[in-house]
Amino acid sequence: MNLRRWLVGLAIAALLAVGGWFGWQRWQSRQAAPEGPRAEVAVPESARPRPGSAEVVSVDTGLDSRLLAGATPMAERVAVVGLLNKRNGETRDLTLKPGQAVRVGDVIVRLRACERTAPWEQEQYTGAFVQMDVRGTDAKWRRAFSGWLFKERPALNVVLHPIYDVWPKSCTMSFPDTGPDTVSAGAGAAAPAANAPRRSSASNAPDTSPVPAESIPSASDNSAE
């Protein structure tokens, strides 16, 4: 009986030892893993810093233009995106067209699209699809943010980065003044269609022609009867 208990205790101790060893190996692998699942991105050759070049570099990413419901084509719109460096408190206004990118030091800001609501809409929104790549201490570029940002509703999407922050400030675009269902107020009454049914004046319209005064009976005539 004592031998059986001893064997059971030995088996439990072995299982605990094996489980502890696997747990320690998993903890070591987590400690050696890089911080966060940030994917490395390929930076165009024109966006890489060169000796003696300026800090700000513009990059054209070749976005195709698209016509959207008669409004300004996407490639012809102009957006202003604000960039903040939280370390030194410096802010910049970046003027971009969809498909362009600007490198400022260790950060690249790309504009994929910008949009704003039509003037006749009740609620006005200004949005921009922005991508931000940041160069780390290992000289590798990583995607820090990618998504839509809105000027009037910044809480809808937040840029979670300890150093840089971006936000849309404007999107210059125009909207069509007329559409397929637009009716001009100064054009006057439209002529009736050829196939529209015509009303008969004798059956439907009341007779509004003047009546001679002689044919109207007087009060004296009624009393004579």
Image (cartoon, grey):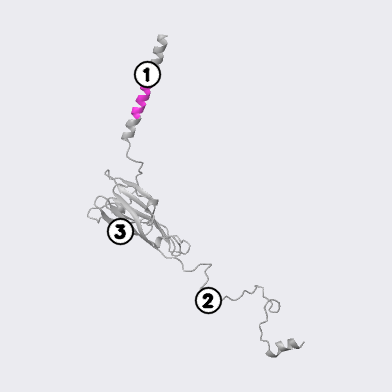
Sort mark 1 into few (<14), some (14-19) or many (20+) by Cα contacts within 10 Å. Answer: few
The three-letter amino acid code for the residue at tag 1 is: Ala
Quadrant location of the C terminus in the rendered image: bottom right
Query: In terms of secondary structure, what is the magenta stretch mainly?
Result: helix
Judging by the rendered image, the residue that carries numbered circle 2 is 187
Displayed quadrant of residue 207: bottom right
In this view, 21 is above or below 74 = above
- Magenta range is 13-25
Quadrant location of the N terminus in the rendered image: top left
Note whether residue 217 is visible.
no
In this view, 27 is above or below 170 = above
Q: For residue 93, which numbered disc appears in the image?
A: 3
Displayed quadrant of residue 64: bottom left
Frontmost residue, 155 versus 221: 221
Q: Where is residue 131 in the image (x, y as percent from the top left)?
A: 36, 51
C-alpha gap between disc 2 and disc 3: 45 Å
Judging by the rendered image, the residue that carries numbered circle 1 is 13
Q: Residue at x 41, y 15 (%)?
A: 8
The three-letter amino acid code for the residue at tag 2 is: Ala
Q: Position of residue 79 (x, y in %)?
A: 36, 60
Q: Position of residue 144 (x, y in %)?
A: 34, 47
C-alpha gap between disc 3 and disc 1: 65 Å
Which badge, 3 or 1, comes first in the chain's sequence? 1
Sort mark 3 into few (<14), some (14-19) or many (20+) by Cα contacts within 10 Å. Answer: some
Does the magenta-highlighted stretch encompass residue 20? yes
Q: Is mark 1 on a helix, strand or loop?
A: helix
Q: Which residue is drawn at 36% across and 26% down?
A: 22
Frontmost residue, 127 versus 54: 127
